Image (tube, rainbow, N blue to C red):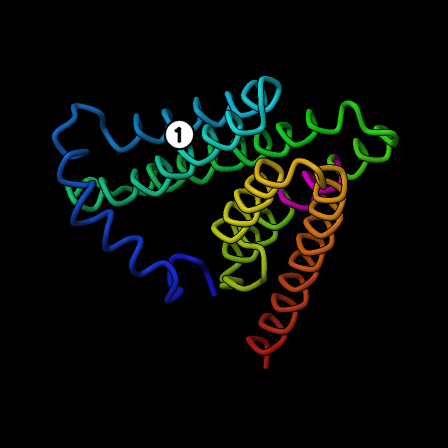
């Protein structure tokens, strides 16, 4: 289940729609420009983590916040478009990269930095593959909206990971390594989930 359709997201989106969106709607920014703002904030995440983990967390939080508002704003203004969805999805992939790059910076002083770099690279690859498998499946007539680590849940995971780094500094090494290994495992499993699901779906369609 996607985060957007989960029961956990309902209060959040209801709060955005009633309390935040009326103010955002008064701005002159278009939904696509709002998407760009979210990307710019995402590019600042590595710099934020370099300065202090709390700053990195704040940039990531605001970037994710902006990312949820662009779609709501487009629907409020009846400005939703195919290009807007494509543009948002494309910039999301770039934001994912910068989020992980921020965590990579936190590993600079780690004893096994090369290993951490390899896992960050592999995690970034798995993250891209999650989106690619879905996009390719849908282009061929499938659905593939399954998997543990779709984009919404990945963002929540990264926010929780960063939050734990900030509030538990005595255990920062353990949190960084455990968070990275778990992220890599979960994203890799999601890729396999989507490949297996797509195969079964296409086999059923032939039958």
Q: Nearer the viewer, residue 128 or 168?
A: 168
Residue at x-position 60% and y-position 32% = 97
Residue at x-position 20% and y-position 41% = 20
The relative height of residue 72 versus residue 191 in the rendered view (above or below) is above
Q: Nearer the viewer, residue 50 or 119?
A: 50
The relative height of residue 153 versus residue 119 in the rendered view (above or below) is below
Position in image of residue 141 (x %, y %): 49, 61
On screen, residue 163 versus residue 89, left or right, reads right
Is 123 a magenta residue? yes
Residue at x-position 56% and y-position 57% = 137
- Mark 1 packing: few (<14 Cα in 10 Å), some, or many (20+)? many
Farthest residue to the bottom: give it: 207
Residue at x-position 76% and y-position 48% = 181
Position in image of residue 66 (x %, y %): 35, 35
Name the main secondary structure of what is drawn in magenta.
helix
On screen, residue 110 versus residue 48, left or right, reads right
On screen, residue 187 versus residue 12, left or right, reads right
Q: Quadrant of residue 111?
A: top right
For label 1, the residue is: 38
Q: Secondary structure at mark 1?
A: helix
On screen, residue 20 versus residue 150, left or right, reads left
Quarter of the figure with the C terminus: bottom right
Q: How many marks?
A: 1
Position in image of residue 86 (x %, y %): 41, 39
Q: Quadrant of residue 73?
A: top left
Position in image of residue 44 (x %, y %): 50, 21
Is 54 a magenta residue? no
Farthest residue to the front: give it: 170
The relative height of residue 192 versus residue 98 in the rendered view (above or below) is below
Query: In this picture, which residue range is highlighted in magenta?
Result: 121-127
């Amino acid at each position: 289940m996607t985060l957007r359709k989960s029961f956990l997201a309902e209060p959040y989106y209801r709060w955005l729609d009633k309390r935040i969106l009326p103010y955002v709607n008064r701005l002159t920014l278009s939904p696509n420009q709002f998407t760009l703002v979210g990307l710019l904030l995402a590019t600042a995440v590595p710099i934020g983590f370099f300065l202090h983990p709390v700053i990195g967390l704040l940039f990531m939080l605001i970037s994710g916040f902006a990312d949820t508002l662009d779609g709501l704003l487009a629907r409020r203004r009846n400005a939703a478009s195919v290009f807007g969805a494509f543009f948002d999805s494309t910039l999301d992939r770039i934001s994912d990269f910068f989020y992980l790059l921020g965590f990579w910076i936190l590993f600079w002083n780690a004893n096994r930095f090369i290993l951490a770099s390899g896992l960050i690279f592999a995690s970034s690859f798995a993250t891209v593959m999650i989106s690619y498998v879905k996009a390719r499946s849908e282009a061929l007539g499938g659905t593939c909206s399954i998997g543990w680590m779709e984009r919404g849940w990945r963002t929540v995971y990264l926010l929780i990971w960063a939050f734990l780094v900030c509030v538990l500094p005595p255990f920062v090494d353990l949190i960084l390594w455990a968070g990275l290994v778990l992220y890599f495992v979960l994203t890799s499993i999601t890729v396999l989930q989507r490949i297996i699901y797509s195969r079964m779906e296409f086999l059923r369609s032939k039958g």
